[in-house]
Image (tube, rainbow, N blue to C red):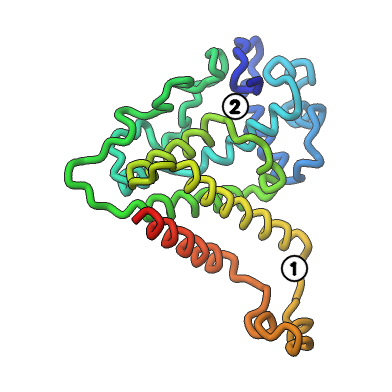
Amino acid sequence: MDNVWSRNQKPSRQTLTLERIVAEAVALLDEEGVGRLTMRRLAERLDTGSTTLYWHVKTKDDVLDLAMDEVFREVRLDDLAGLAGLAGWKGAGSGAAGWEGAGSGAAGWEGAGSGAAGWEGAGSRPAGWEGDWRAPVRGLMRRWRAALLRHPWSATLLDRPLMGPHALRRTEFLYETLTAAGFAVPKTAAYSLSNYVMGSVIMQVTWERSGGTDTGVYLRERADRYPALAEHGLEHDWDATFDEGLDYLLEGMARSRA
Protein backbone atom coordinates (compact mmCIF):
# COMPACT_ATOMS: atom_id res chain seq x y z
CA MET A 1 0.00 0.00 0.00
CA ASP A 2 1.32 3.40 -0.96
CA ASN A 3 0.11 6.42 0.96
CA VAL A 4 1.55 9.37 2.83
CA TRP A 5 2.05 7.29 6.00
CA SER A 6 3.73 4.31 4.34
CA ARG A 7 6.58 6.31 2.79
CA ASN A 8 9.79 7.17 4.58
CA GLN A 9 9.59 10.82 5.53
CA LYS A 10 12.41 13.09 4.44
CA PRO A 11 14.17 15.06 7.15
CA SER A 12 13.17 18.69 6.97
CA ARG A 13 15.65 21.17 5.55
CA GLN A 14 13.39 24.13 6.16
CA THR A 15 11.50 25.69 9.03
CA LEU A 16 8.31 24.45 7.39
CA THR A 17 7.06 21.33 9.12
CA LEU A 18 4.47 18.75 8.19
CA GLU A 19 2.46 19.77 11.24
CA ARG A 20 2.26 23.37 9.94
CA ILE A 21 1.21 22.15 6.52
CA VAL A 22 -1.59 20.05 7.96
CA ALA A 23 -2.82 22.81 10.26
CA GLU A 24 -2.93 25.32 7.40
CA ALA A 25 -4.60 22.83 5.10
CA VAL A 26 -7.35 22.21 7.65
CA ALA A 27 -7.82 25.96 8.08
CA LEU A 28 -8.10 26.45 4.31
CA LEU A 29 -10.57 23.59 3.99
CA ASP A 30 -12.67 24.93 6.88
CA GLU A 31 -12.82 28.35 5.25
CA GLU A 32 -13.25 27.45 1.60
CA GLY A 33 -13.88 23.74 1.11
CA VAL A 34 -12.17 20.97 -0.84
CA GLY A 35 -12.70 22.57 -4.23
CA ARG A 36 -10.47 25.53 -3.34
CA LEU A 37 -7.53 23.53 -2.05
CA THR A 38 -4.58 23.53 -4.43
CA MET A 39 -0.91 23.03 -3.72
CA ARG A 40 -0.18 26.56 -4.98
CA ARG A 41 -2.78 28.18 -2.71
CA LEU A 42 -1.60 26.16 0.26
CA ALA A 43 2.00 27.18 -0.39
CA GLU A 44 0.96 30.82 -0.60
CA ARG A 45 -0.84 30.61 2.74
CA LEU A 46 2.30 29.09 4.23
CA ASP A 47 4.38 31.88 2.68
CA THR A 48 6.57 29.40 0.90
CA GLY A 49 7.09 27.97 -2.58
CA SER A 50 5.49 24.88 -4.04
CA THR A 51 8.92 23.23 -4.23
CA THR A 52 9.28 23.46 -0.48
CA LEU A 53 5.77 22.07 -0.02
CA TYR A 54 6.52 19.10 -2.28
CA TRP A 55 9.49 18.25 -0.09
CA HIS A 56 6.98 17.13 2.54
CA VAL A 57 4.02 15.85 0.51
CA LYS A 58 3.89 14.42 -3.00
CA THR A 59 0.34 15.26 -4.04
CA LYS A 60 -2.84 17.07 -3.11
CA ASP A 61 -4.25 13.68 -2.13
CA ASP A 62 -1.53 13.41 0.50
CA VAL A 63 -2.67 16.74 1.94
CA LEU A 64 -6.32 15.66 1.98
CA ASP A 65 -5.44 12.37 3.68
CA LEU A 66 -3.43 14.18 6.33
CA ALA A 67 -6.15 16.79 6.87
CA MET A 68 -8.80 14.12 7.19
CA ASP A 69 -6.72 12.25 9.74
CA GLU A 70 -6.28 15.48 11.69
CA VAL A 71 -10.05 15.63 12.08
CA PHE A 72 -9.97 12.24 13.79
CA ARG A 73 -7.27 13.52 16.11
CA GLU A 74 -9.98 15.66 17.76
CA VAL A 75 -11.85 12.56 18.98
CA ARG A 76 -10.78 12.06 22.60
CA LEU A 77 -10.46 8.53 23.96
CA ASP A 78 -9.05 8.83 27.48
CA ASP A 79 -12.32 8.75 29.42
CA LEU A 80 -13.89 6.28 26.98
CA ALA A 81 -11.10 3.78 27.62
CA GLY A 82 -12.05 3.80 31.29
CA LEU A 83 -15.73 3.26 30.48
CA ALA A 84 -14.82 0.34 28.24
CA GLY A 85 -12.76 -1.29 31.00
CA LEU A 86 -9.74 -1.35 28.69
CA ALA A 87 -7.05 -0.59 31.21
CA GLY A 88 -4.32 -1.48 28.70
CA TRP A 89 -5.02 1.40 26.33
CA LYS A 90 -1.79 3.40 26.03
CA GLY A 91 -1.88 7.15 25.62
CA ALA A 92 -5.58 7.36 24.86
CA GLY A 93 -6.62 10.90 24.08
CA SER A 94 -3.09 12.27 23.81
CA GLY A 95 -2.72 15.29 21.61
CA ALA A 96 -0.28 13.63 19.27
CA ALA A 97 -2.02 10.24 19.27
CA GLY A 98 1.05 8.53 17.93
CA TRP A 99 2.36 11.27 15.67
CA GLU A 100 5.99 12.11 16.32
CA GLY A 101 6.67 14.32 13.34
CA ALA A 102 8.53 13.73 10.10
CA GLY A 103 11.58 11.55 9.99
CA SER A 104 10.45 8.10 11.07
CA GLY A 105 9.98 5.33 8.57
CA ALA A 106 6.34 4.93 9.47
CA ALA A 107 5.61 8.62 9.00
CA GLY A 108 5.45 9.27 12.70
CA TRP A 109 3.26 6.41 13.83
CA GLU A 110 4.70 5.00 17.02
CA GLY A 111 4.35 1.26 17.11
CA ALA A 112 3.14 1.16 13.50
CA GLY A 113 2.91 -2.33 12.08
CA SER A 114 2.52 -4.01 15.45
CA GLY A 115 -0.53 -6.11 16.08
CA ALA A 116 -1.34 -4.09 19.16
CA ALA A 117 -1.47 -0.79 17.25
CA GLY A 118 -0.88 1.31 20.33
CA TRP A 119 -2.10 -1.06 23.02
CA GLU A 120 -0.44 -2.54 26.04
CA GLY A 121 -2.21 -5.78 26.83
CA ALA A 122 -4.90 -5.29 24.18
CA GLY A 123 -8.30 -6.56 25.23
CA SER A 124 -7.46 -6.69 28.94
CA ARG A 125 -10.11 -5.71 31.48
CA PRO A 126 -9.78 -5.09 35.19
CA ALA A 127 -10.96 -7.93 37.39
CA GLY A 128 -14.63 -7.69 38.20
CA TRP A 129 -15.37 -5.20 35.43
CA GLU A 130 -19.12 -5.04 34.82
CA GLY A 131 -19.40 -1.93 32.67
CA ASP A 132 -21.75 -1.48 29.74
CA TRP A 133 -19.87 -1.59 26.43
CA ARG A 134 -22.58 0.56 24.87
CA ALA A 135 -21.50 3.64 26.85
CA PRO A 136 -17.97 3.95 25.35
CA VAL A 137 -19.21 2.95 21.89
CA ARG A 138 -21.99 5.54 22.06
CA GLY A 139 -19.48 8.16 23.22
CA LEU A 140 -17.06 7.33 20.41
CA MET A 141 -19.75 7.49 17.72
CA ARG A 142 -21.02 10.83 19.02
CA ARG A 143 -17.49 12.25 19.01
CA TRP A 144 -16.74 10.94 15.53
CA ARG A 145 -19.88 12.65 14.26
CA ALA A 146 -19.16 15.89 16.12
CA ALA A 147 -15.60 16.08 14.75
CA LEU A 148 -16.79 15.50 11.19
CA LEU A 149 -19.54 18.12 11.52
CA ARG A 150 -17.03 20.69 12.82
CA HIS A 151 -15.32 20.29 9.46
CA PRO A 152 -18.17 19.86 6.94
CA TRP A 153 -15.75 19.40 4.04
CA SER A 154 -14.83 16.04 5.56
CA ALA A 155 -18.21 14.66 4.44
CA THR A 156 -16.98 14.76 0.83
CA LEU A 157 -13.90 12.67 1.70
CA LEU A 158 -15.50 9.82 3.62
CA ASP A 159 -15.15 7.54 0.60
CA ARG A 160 -11.37 7.63 1.03
CA PRO A 161 -9.55 4.87 2.97
CA LEU A 162 -9.12 6.14 6.53
CA MET A 163 -5.62 4.74 7.05
CA GLY A 164 -4.00 7.52 9.05
CA PRO A 165 -2.71 6.87 12.58
CA HIS A 166 -5.42 8.91 14.30
CA ALA A 167 -8.29 7.24 12.45
CA LEU A 168 -6.75 3.79 12.87
CA ARG A 169 -6.18 4.37 16.57
CA ARG A 170 -9.86 5.13 17.08
CA THR A 171 -10.97 2.22 14.92
CA GLU A 172 -8.64 -0.03 16.91
CA PHE A 173 -10.27 1.24 20.09
CA LEU A 174 -13.69 0.39 18.67
CA TYR A 175 -12.61 -3.12 17.64
CA GLU A 176 -11.04 -3.79 21.03
CA THR A 177 -14.12 -2.51 22.88
CA LEU A 178 -16.43 -4.71 20.81
CA THR A 179 -14.14 -7.71 21.20
CA ALA A 180 -14.02 -7.25 24.97
CA ALA A 181 -17.82 -6.99 24.96
CA GLY A 182 -18.09 -10.46 23.45
CA PHE A 183 -18.54 -9.81 19.73
CA ALA A 184 -16.78 -12.67 17.96
CA VAL A 185 -16.63 -10.70 14.70
CA PRO A 186 -16.16 -7.03 15.70
CA LYS A 187 -15.67 -6.01 12.07
CA THR A 188 -19.35 -6.42 11.23
CA ALA A 189 -20.51 -4.43 14.26
CA ALA A 190 -17.91 -1.72 13.64
CA TYR A 191 -18.93 -1.53 9.98
CA SER A 192 -22.56 -0.95 10.93
CA LEU A 193 -21.68 1.75 13.45
CA SER A 194 -19.18 3.65 11.31
CA ASN A 195 -21.47 3.63 8.28
CA TYR A 196 -24.32 4.92 10.40
CA VAL A 197 -22.15 7.84 11.51
CA MET A 198 -20.85 8.61 8.03
CA GLY A 199 -24.29 8.36 6.45
CA SER A 200 -25.83 10.69 9.01
CA VAL A 201 -23.04 13.25 8.55
CA ILE A 202 -23.30 13.19 4.75
CA MET A 203 -27.08 13.58 4.93
CA GLN A 204 -26.94 16.49 7.40
CA VAL A 205 -24.16 18.36 5.61
CA THR A 206 -25.86 17.94 2.23
CA TRP A 207 -29.20 19.11 3.63
CA GLU A 208 -27.69 22.16 5.33
CA ARG A 209 -25.66 23.14 2.26
CA SER A 210 -28.84 23.12 0.20
CA GLY A 211 -30.32 25.65 2.60
CA GLY A 212 -32.84 23.14 3.88
CA THR A 213 -36.31 22.66 2.47
CA ASP A 214 -39.63 23.02 4.23
CA THR A 215 -41.26 19.79 3.10
CA GLY A 216 -44.03 19.92 5.68
CA VAL A 217 -46.49 21.99 3.64
CA TYR A 218 -45.93 19.86 0.53
CA LEU A 219 -46.57 16.63 2.42
CA ARG A 220 -49.59 17.90 4.35
CA GLU A 221 -51.20 18.98 1.08
CA ARG A 222 -50.81 15.38 -0.09
CA ALA A 223 -51.76 13.67 3.15
CA ASP A 224 -54.17 11.38 1.33
CA ARG A 225 -51.23 9.81 -0.51
CA TYR A 226 -48.57 10.08 2.20
CA PRO A 227 -50.42 10.03 5.54
CA ALA A 228 -47.48 8.81 7.65
CA LEU A 229 -45.10 11.36 6.12
CA ALA A 230 -47.65 14.13 6.50
CA GLU A 231 -47.96 13.28 10.18
CA HIS A 232 -44.29 12.80 11.05
CA GLY A 233 -42.49 14.84 8.37
CA LEU A 234 -39.00 14.58 6.93
CA GLU A 235 -37.27 17.36 8.89
CA HIS A 236 -35.00 16.38 11.75
CA ASP A 237 -33.69 17.56 15.02
CA TRP A 238 -30.36 16.21 13.83
CA ASP A 239 -28.81 15.56 17.24
CA ALA A 240 -31.90 13.91 18.73
CA THR A 241 -32.50 11.82 15.62
CA PHE A 242 -28.89 10.64 15.55
CA ASP A 243 -28.95 9.65 19.23
CA GLU A 244 -32.26 7.81 18.91
CA GLY A 245 -31.10 5.92 15.82
CA LEU A 246 -27.81 5.05 17.51
CA ASP A 247 -29.71 3.65 20.49
CA TYR A 248 -31.78 1.47 18.14
CA LEU A 249 -28.60 0.17 16.56
CA LEU A 250 -26.83 -0.54 19.85
CA GLU A 251 -29.90 -2.24 21.31
CA GLY A 252 -30.17 -4.48 18.27
CA MET A 253 -26.48 -5.34 18.52
CA ALA A 254 -26.84 -6.17 22.22
CA ARG A 255 -29.76 -8.53 21.55
CA SER A 256 -27.94 -10.18 18.66
CA ARG A 257 -24.87 -10.77 20.82
CA ALA A 258 -27.03 -12.25 23.59
* Residue 237 horizontal/vertical position (percent): 59, 70
* Residue 171 horizontal/vertical position (percent): 48, 39
* 106 with respect to 206 (left or right): left
What residue appears at the point 69 percent right and 29 percent down from the top-left corner? 63
Q: Is residue 43 above or below residue 79?
A: above
Q: CA distance from mark 1 to mark 2?
A: 36 Å
Q: Amino acid at mark 1?
A: Gly
Q: Amino acid at mark 2?
A: Glu
The label on residue 19 is: 2
What residue appears at the point 53 percent right and 36 percent down from the top-left corner? 167
Q: Is residue 101 above or below residue 232?
A: above
Q: Choose top left, top right, bottom left or bottom right for residue 232.
A: bottom right
What residue appears at the point 45 percent right and 49 percent down from the top-left corner? 140
* Residue 243 horizontal/vertical position (percent): 50, 63
Residue closer to the observer: 218 or 100: 218
Callout 1: helix, strand or loop?
A: loop
Q: Which residue is mark 1?
A: 212
Residue closer to the observer: 180 or 12: 180
Q: Is residue 72 above or below residue 9?
A: below
Q: Residues within 10 Å of mark 1 (few under 14, many from 20)?
A: few
* Residue 109 horizontal/vertical position (percent): 50, 22
